Image: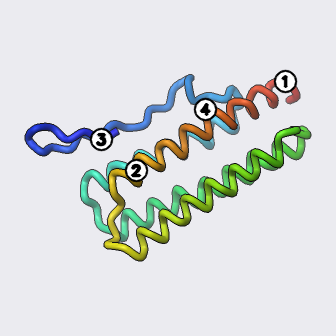
Amino acid sequence: MRKVTSCGEVIVKDLVWSNTLSVEVDEIDEDHRRLVDLFNILNHAVADGESADYQEAVLEELISCTVWHFKHEERLMLKYAYEELAAHKTEHQDLIESAKALQQQFLQADKRIANKDIEFLEHWLTEHILVADMRLGAYLIEVM
């Protein structure tokens, strides 16, 4: 994710979209690509020391797009009678609450996003895609 060289230089590693993150459902994959792009924009904004206002704007956009994406997935789960809807929706709610809690800490603190926050967001995004969304994708492929 982030590496500091012996010279003190910060090297930022982007989250790269690949087939590993694909759930094989185009409309969901398109959403996920956008979320990955926004995560990378935020990651670079933090590493480059962009203004707190800019970091706040990118974090807000990431959270807003995630909320929209989760509603999109939930609509598909309803349409195709996904049996794990309740558990998946609960996971969505938990993820949004944790992201909003991070956002509140950011707004109340020194207005800087720390490396640990970036690592949290990366895990938050990839873990949900690789576990819950992969199950959803497999189901949707069968029923769509």
Q: Are the residues at dot 3 and dot 4 in contact (C-beta closer than 8 Å)?
A: no
Closer to the camera: disc 4 or disc 1?
4
Q: Which mark is residue 118?
A: 2
Closer to the camera: disc 3 or disc 1?
3
Q: Residues within 10 Å of mark 2 (few under 14, many from 20)?
A: some
- Percent across and percent down for residue 127 are 57, 38
Q: Residue at x 36, y 73 (%)?
A: 109
Can you identify the residue that label 1 sits on? Answer: 142
Can you identify the residue that label 4 sits on? Answer: 130
Apparent side of residue 134 relative to residue 127 in the rendered image (left or right): right
Can you identify the residue that label 3 sits on? Answer: 2
Q: Amino acid at mark 1?
A: Glu
Q: Amino acid at mark 2?
A: Ile
Whole-angstrom CA distance, mark 2 to mark 3, is 9 Å
Q: Residue at x 8, y 41 (%)?
A: 7
**Quadrant the C terminus occupies:** top right
Q: Residues within 10 Å of mark 4 (few under 14, many from 20)?
A: some
- Percent across and percent down for residue 104 are 49, 71
